[in-house]
Amino acid sequence: MNRDEIEGKEKDVKGRIKEATGALTGNEDLEQRGADERSQGQAQHDLGSARRKVGEAIEDLGDEIKR
């Protein structure tokens, strides 16, 4: 996992907690902020995952060229 994947997962979890807390307390503003943070976290995680996969593919290509 790279930094974006880890930070994205943290934002996702924090957002889920805020969203659930907002839903339980009836605080629509907190619920919406949590949903937004969760979405941002998921996007950051997905970007990090894609970046890692591209890096791995480039490394594999380099290994193939060396052979």
Image: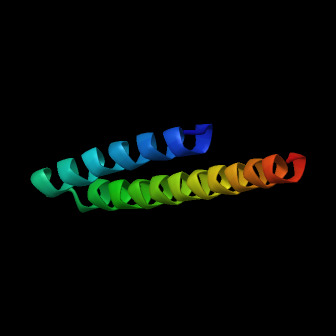
The residue positioned farthest toward the left in the image shown: 24
- Can you say which quadrant of the picture contains the N terminus? top right
- Where is 43 relative to 17, above or below? below
Which coloring applies here? rainbow
| Total count of labels | 0
Residue 37 screen position, x and y as percent: 43, 54
Residue at (35% x, 42% y) in the render: 14
Left or right of 41? Residue 14 is: left
Between residue 57 and residue 37, name the one nearer to us: 57
Left or right of 50? Residue 43 is: left
Residue 63 screen position, x and y as percent: 80, 46
The residue positioned farthest toward the front in the image shown: 67
Left or right of 23? Residue 14 is: right
The residue positioned farthest toward the right in the image shown: 66
Residue 26 screen position, x and y as percent: 14, 58
- Where is 54 relative to 59, above or below? below
Left or right of 33? Residue 57 is: right
Residue 9 screen position, x and y as percent: 43, 44
Between residue 46 and residue 17, name the one nearer to us: 46
Residue at (60% x, 37% y) in the render: 3
Residue at (29% x, 50% y) in the render: 16
Residue at (35% x, 60% y) in the render: 35
